[in-house]
Image (spheres, grey):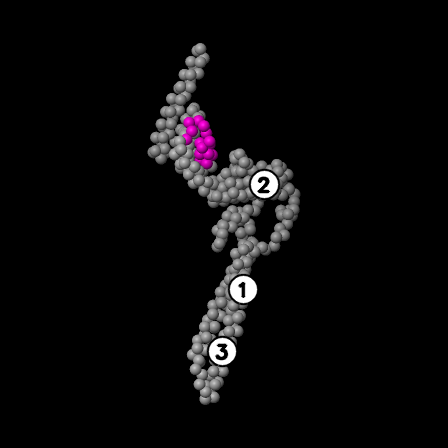
């Protein structure tokens, strides 16, 4: 009997303490002290589990830009049956999860050898239920190590919204770097390089046709002037002169455009092979977002 009373008293005291912590957490949140509010919400949740307390802690984590913890807390709040969220709270939570995902990247690491360890920002990453790793926007240091292999360190820039698999192969100690897997790709053109070169070639072909048209118009104009010099009358001399000038202008414009297109395509091809291929992360291109990873 005494034990039952003691358990009931402890439970009541814990609930009262949780409510007091919740009031303090709400007060700190309203004052903009989000770190303090998160800590208080989590302490209250330990004493009296509640989806609403997890939601509050997730909202505070979002405000301090801890997007990984914010995402996890808000997701747990949605499925928790301890003091579950109201319909309005659920809708607000789902909307905040959508905002949070914009600041997260989801990554899968495929490492060789399989026993290699992965550390991100000097600690072992916490994996999600599906084995993926969530990283917040910004730069992260990735280190992959295995006994008997050279370790690899790489900076990984997360821009938000990524869902990628990163393949990392370590080289055995005592081998020349790059000897096991020589790069036989050569210089590969991307779609934009092909488009620039192809479009430039098309304009050069148009310029070639324009030269023919300009020469033909010039021949007709010469015939007209010779006829007038012989005492005749050429009624369409102004028209022929205008046609020749127009063909000359079009030929010049097409030729310059073609040369610029081909030159830009070749330069992009040559520069991207040496520079972009060695740079990890995503970089904006002219028409798309170009993401490359090398370890």
Badges 3 and 2: C-beta atoms under 8 Å apart?
Answer: no
Please give the label number shown on residue 146. Answer: none
Q: Which residues are magenta?
A: 70-85
Q: CA distance from mark 2 to mark 1?
A: 42 Å
Q: Between 83 and 270, which is closer to the camera in this rendering?
A: 83
- Where does the N terminus fall, quadrant-wise? top left
Q: Position of residue 155 (x, y in %)?
A: 52, 44
Q: Which residue is mark 3?
A: 218
Image position of 113 (left or right of 142):
right
Residue 110: mark: 2
- Pick the residue in front: 240 or 293: 240
Q: Is residue 104 left or right of residue 118?
A: left
- Residue 155, above or below 287: above
Residue 19 forms part of the magenta stretch: no
The local secondary structure at tag 2 comes to strand
User: 90 or 73: nearer the eye?
Assistant: 90
Q: Quadrant of residue 7?
A: top left
Magenta span includes 75: yes
Instruction: Categorize mark 2 by other alpha carbons within 10 Å: few (<14), some (14-19), many (20+).
Output: few
Question: For numbered disc 1, what is the local secondary structure?
Answer: helix
In the rendered image, the residue lying farthest to the bottom is 231
- Residue shown at the point (45%, 28%) measured from the top left: 81
Residue at the spot 44% in from the left edge and 13% down from the top edge: 4
Residue 36 in sight in this render: no
Mark 3: which secondary structure? helix
Q: Nearer the viewer, mark 2 or mark 1?
A: 1
Q: Main secondary structure of the magenta part?
A: helix
Circle 1 sits on which residue?
Answer: 201
């Amino acid at each position: 009997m005494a034990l039952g009373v003691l358990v009931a008293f402890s439970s009541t005291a814990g609930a009262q303490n949780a409510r007091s912590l919740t009031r303090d957490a709400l007060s700190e949140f309203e004052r903009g002290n989000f770190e303090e509010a998160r800590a208080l919400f989590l302490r209250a949740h330990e004493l009296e589990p509640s989806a609403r307390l997890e939601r509050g802690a997730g909202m505070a984590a979002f405000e301090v830009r801890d997007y990984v913890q914010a995402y996890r807390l808000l997701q747990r709040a949605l499925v928790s049956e301890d003091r579950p969220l109201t319909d309005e709270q659920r809708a607000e939570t789902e909307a905040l999860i959508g905002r949070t995902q914009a600041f997260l990247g989801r990554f899968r690491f495929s490492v060789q050898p399989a026993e290699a360890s992965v550390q991100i920002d000097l600690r072992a990453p916490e994996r999600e239920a599906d084995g993926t790793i969530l990283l917040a926007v910004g730069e992260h240091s990735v280190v992959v190590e295995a006994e008997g292999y050279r370790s690899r360190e790489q900076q990984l820039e997360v821009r938000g919204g990524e869902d990628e698999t990163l393949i990392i192969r370590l080289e055995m100690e005592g081998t020349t770097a790059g000897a096991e897997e020589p790069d036989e790709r050569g210089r590969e053109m991307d779609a934009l390089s092909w488009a620039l070169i192809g479009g430039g070639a098309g304009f050069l072909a148009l310029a070639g046709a324009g030269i023919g048209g300009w020469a033909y118009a010039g021949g007709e104009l010469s015939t007209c002037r010779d006829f007038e010099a012989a005492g005749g009358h050429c009624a369409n001399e102004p028209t022929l002169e205008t046609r020749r000038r127009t063909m000359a202008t079009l030929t010049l414009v097409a030729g310059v455009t073609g040369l610029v297109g081909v030159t830009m395509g070749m330069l992009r091809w040559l520069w991207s092979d040496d520079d972009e291929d060695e740079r990890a992360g995503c970089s904006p291109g002219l028409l798309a977002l170009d993401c490359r990873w090398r370890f």
